[in-house]
Amino acid sequence: MKQILQSHFSGESLKAKVLRGGALLGSGSTAEQLFRFGRNMVLTRLLAPQAFGTMAVVMSTTAILESFLDVGARDALIQNPRGSEKHYVGAAWWLSVGRSSGIYFVLFLLAPWVGRFYGNNELVGLMRVASIGLLLEGVMSPRAYVSMKEMKFKKWMIVNHGGAICGVLITLLLGFLIRDVWALAIGFVSEHAARCVLSYALCPFTPPIRWNREAIRELLGFSKGVFGLSILNLVFVRADIFVLAKLYTPAQLGLYAMAVYLIQTPTGFIVNLLRQTLMPTFSHIQNDSPRINRILLQVTGVILLVGMPGLVFLFFCGHSLLTLVYGARYGAASAALIVASCVALLNIVNNQVTTVFYAKGLPQLHRGCVLIMAILMIFMIYPFAKWFGMVGGQWACLVAIVAGCLFQIDRIRRVTGVNLSPYRKSFFVSAAISLSAVAVCLMARSLGSMSRPLPTLFFGAMGCLVAYGLAFAIVSRGRIDSGLSL
């Protein structure tokens, strides 16, 4: 084992750096998500569901406006070969500060209108306080982003995940003291405050009085390709919250939001982990298309082998999982959880193609995908929410992500020349392996062993283990190459 670890993790090769970085970021992300998971288990028992529904509207409004002014400073620094130079770092800081200040000013003025639209005056103060977190995000040390570009992932792990854990603990304490939605709003601000402090402590940076015009021009050149992507993506991600908040009560929205968040939490963990490691990796080999294709196919194969048995688990155990984690009243949102899990898996797969586009300095190629998804959501979300109830929000997301994935896969084929046959094979093999998990769950259900939450979760987990055992056997025999070969 020691020899294997040394051969894969030691040295300065690209493979060793990626594996070391992935291990560090993975451990940090895991710790953060465990803290968030524990926080939510406690807060759903301390706060009423309408608190989460109200906060979902606040966060969605903030995210939509934030996406309008997205300049992609972090990705521009990572992608640009000169991104670690002093002038570029200073330019990125000024861009971030200008963006965050503009967002806060507009949100401050927009808050009363949002409160009147939803008939909830409490939204005004909540939005104005929560948006302070965006100001703090804008003034973070850009040297923290440079550390990620240089593949020094330890510093970024402490800044990003350490700050988040501090914020989670503060939110939990406030939940006991305040016991209303303000605990969530102040906790959100505290996360960004902790990240900001840690960024300057670990990655010192003195903001320049002036910015370099050439650096600004180059960073904005990348931003032109990014422009519009965030807002379109946010329409896809957040349109359900805006429409459901108008059609249903805050309590119903709270049940839906927490059920969807339960699957979005590990999804965000996986997406961020893969993006933070593969973005610099693909950037280093951006002109080597065969190598990029090999990594893309192998990572996608692993995602599907792990993800599809997870879908089976949530299909059979979603109600029990929500009941055990959040309480009995949240079990009513199990349908939304199941459909959201399908959306999440496809979103993870789709994000790997997006990372290739960004690493090659072609973020504009992603625009067609998010445009399709946004248009479909705009036209489908309201009728789906009326026809299917709360779960209709996720059905609309599923149709949109399927269309976006198909478009994006066709585009990556034209850009890098990737062979789509292994891509299709990964889906079919993973689906076939997942049938073993289905068999275990159906057998347990026929014997009456899945009538209570804990036995249901136990047999669902056993089904996943059987599927993963088959996947490991196939991989070890070389029938499907899932190793990360750099």
Image (cartoon, grey):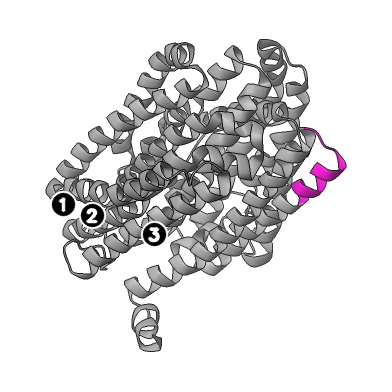
Q: Amino acid at mark 2?
A: Leu
The residue that label 3 is drawn on is 465
Disc nearest the viewer among 3 and 1: 3
Mark drawn on residue 297: 2
Range covered by the magenta-colored residues: 170-180
Residue 114 percent location from the top left of the image: 66, 17
Mark drawn on residue 450: none
Q: Are marks 1 and 2 in contact (CB under 8 Å)?
A: yes
Residue 199 percent location from the top left of the image: 64, 59
Quick one: quadrant of the N terminus?
bottom left
Vertical arrangement, residue 252 with respect to residue 367, above or below: above
Mark 3 vs 1, N-terminal side: 1
Q: Residues within 10 Å of mark 3 (few under 14, many from 20)?
A: some
Could you give the CA–CA distance between mark 1 and mark 2, rounded to whole angstroms?
7 Å
Which residue is the extreme one toward the front? 447
Instruction: Between residue 321 and residue 58, name the one nearer to us.
Output: 321
The residue that label 1 is drawn on is 422
Q: Residues within 10 Å of mark 1 (few under 14, many from 20)?
A: some
In the picture, measured across the screen, residue 71 lies left or right of residue 130, that is: left
Q: Amino acid at mark 3?
A: Leu
Q: Residue at x 43, y 15 (%)?
A: 384
Instruction: Between residue 398 and residue 233, name the one nearer to us.
Output: 398
Q: Residue at x 58, y 33 (%)?
A: 331
Count of marks, rendered view: 3
Magenta stretch: includes residue 347: no
In the picture, measured across the screen, residue 428 lies left or right of residue 118, that is: left
Q: Residues within 10 Å of mark 2 (few under 14, many from 20)?
A: many
Instruction: Between residue 170 and residue 460, name the one nearer to us.
Output: 460
Q: Are marks 2 and 3 in contact (CB under 8 Å)?
A: no
For the residue labelled by badge 1, is the local secondary structure a helix, a strand or a loop? helix
Instruction: Between residue 23 and residue 215, name the one nearer to us.
Output: 23
User: Magenta residues: mostly which secondary structure?
Assistant: helix
